[in-house]
Amino acid sequence: MKIEQIYTGCLAEAAYYIESEGEAMIIDPLRETKPYIDRAAQDNAKIKYILETHFHADFVSGHLDLSAKTGATIVFGPTAAPGYHAHVATDGEILVLGKLKIKVLHTPGHTMESTTYLLIDENGKESAIFTGDTLFIGDVGRPDLVQKVKKEITPEFLAGQLFDSLRNKIMPLSDDIIVFPGHGAGSACGKNMSKETTDTLGNQKKYNYALRADMTRDEFIKEVTEGLVAPPQYFPHNVIMNVTGGLNSIDQIIRKGTTALDPGQFQLVWEAEEAIVIDTRNKNQFPKEFLPGAIFIGLDDNFAPWVGTLVTELKQPILLITEEGKEEEAVIRLARVGYDNTLGYLKGGIAAWKAAGLPTDQIEEIDADSFVRMYEKYKELQVLDVRRESEYTSQHIEGTMSFPLDFINSNMSMLDKNNTYYIHCAGGYRSMITASILKARGFHKLINIQGGFAALSKTALPKSTYEAPKTML
């Protein structure tokens, strides 16, 4: 028996590979199929099943492509109604994989079709559960992601379902069972996940707030539904894609997205298709020289979630600026969250663009120490703190304004193009995204503070916390 967690850090997502006697299954695969096919090939194994714990909101699953390429059966839990051929299992149904058995446990709450898969090993011992978004390490799945699909399924209703699922299906299991969740810290599918990505069920019963033995149903509903922030705007679109199917194959998307365009072709496609140009280089390269109008979202951080948060139309034509050899990675990471309309990349990058005699732009930057001197001399500097509201409330530099990047599309009208704005986030990634968006929208008096709050917090600048921060939410 082999169990392997295939963890993708930028989405904080865990897929699983399980093999026994030459038969394999994949649980919750991402859009690209090659890693799973290659992994099975290492064991000379045939992928028999593709198990989906639920209809995902934070990524587009690769189950359809993977099934088409391998012949594996797609399996959903009870009540699922996919718009394509799949096996909808019954509660308690047993699937056989080599010498292993997989028991289907219907655990509604995160969604109504949410299902946990209980692994029974060669000796008949219940040894692991693959919980999807039902149970995380340190948390449980948020119950508010399907309320727009059916009016009567409120977060409170789903939280009650989740309470019952955990108490009736999960908590009665043995303490030594290993919990393999669908996500880790950083995912928007929960609010208090641990950085650990596996644990024993016994430890979770001790330390997970949602599994307290003395917790009442009403207490659970209250605690699970408190403090939830609005999910990224692409979540409901990804759910629909996962439910209905009919998607282009990842191979088609990669072929189109990795089309090499010389500067003339790139410029023509940009104008003709009204594309967005996303520059995926790192935050230190971008401000020195970039295409006027390009948006920075670097591959070296949470690239796909930020595209999903900021680019509101999934069918939006996209063109890419990448470091050499990173084109396919960028296309795949976009496709993971449903952005399938990448039209190509700039062959030769910025150097080719300049060689063609085309213009570039820059964003001014200032280091933390230089900013301190400016701050002390000019007390009326306008500083935008683009971290999330919770980060700002926890601690911020006095006199700064909360301007979360998450809400830039709705809050931009509150800024004045005649003003000079200093911008910072926690470490420099989000502030550079913010500066690039504002620059593309006609704000030219922008200065990015290098190193962000991490650098500023080491200075003597006064810091504050407020119950009701000055904000642009």
Image (tube, rainbow, N blue to C red):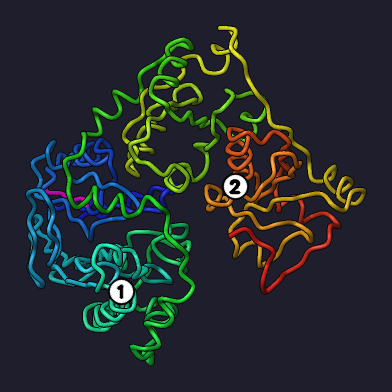
Mark 2, secondary structure of its residue: helix
Reading the image, the residue beneath label 1 is 154
Q: Is residue 130 above or below residue 411?
A: below
- Looking at the picture, how far across and down is residue 287, in whole percent? 66, 30
Q: Residue furthest top?
A: 356
> Which comes sooner in the sequence, label 2 or label 1?
1
What's the residue at 48%, 12% (across, down)?
Answer: 263
Q: Is residue 436 above or below residue 240?
A: above
Magenta-colored segment: predominant secondary structure = strand
What's the residue at 71%, 53% (across, down)?
Answer: 453
Residue 182 located left or right of residue 76: right
Residue 23 belongs to magenta span: yes
Residue 383 visible in the current orientation: yes
Distance from label 2 to label 1 (Cα)? Answer: 32 Å
**Span highlighted in magenta in the image:** 22-26
Residue nearest the observer in this picture, 23 or 150: 150
Pointer 2 with pointer 1, Cβ within 8 A: no
What's the residue at 60%, 7% (across, down)?
Answer: 357
Type of amino acid at the residue the image marks with label 2: Met
Q: Residue furthest right?
A: 377
- Looking at the picture, how far across and down is residue 244, in whole percent? 17, 49
Type of amino acid at the residue the image marks with label 1: Thr
Reading the image, the residue beneath label 2 is 412
Residue nearest the observer in this picture, 270 or 328: 270
Residue nearest the observer in this picture, 38 or 132: 132
Q: Which quadrant would residue 219 be assigned to in this image?
A: bottom left
Q: Which quadrant would residue 181 be assigned to in this image?
A: bottom left
Crowding at dot 2, Cα within 10 Å, few <14 / some 14-19 / many 20+, comes out as some
Residue nearest the observer in this picture, 151 or 226: 151
Mark 1, secondary structure of its residue: loop
Tally of numbered tags: 2
What's the residue at 19%, 52% (across, down)?
Answer: 243
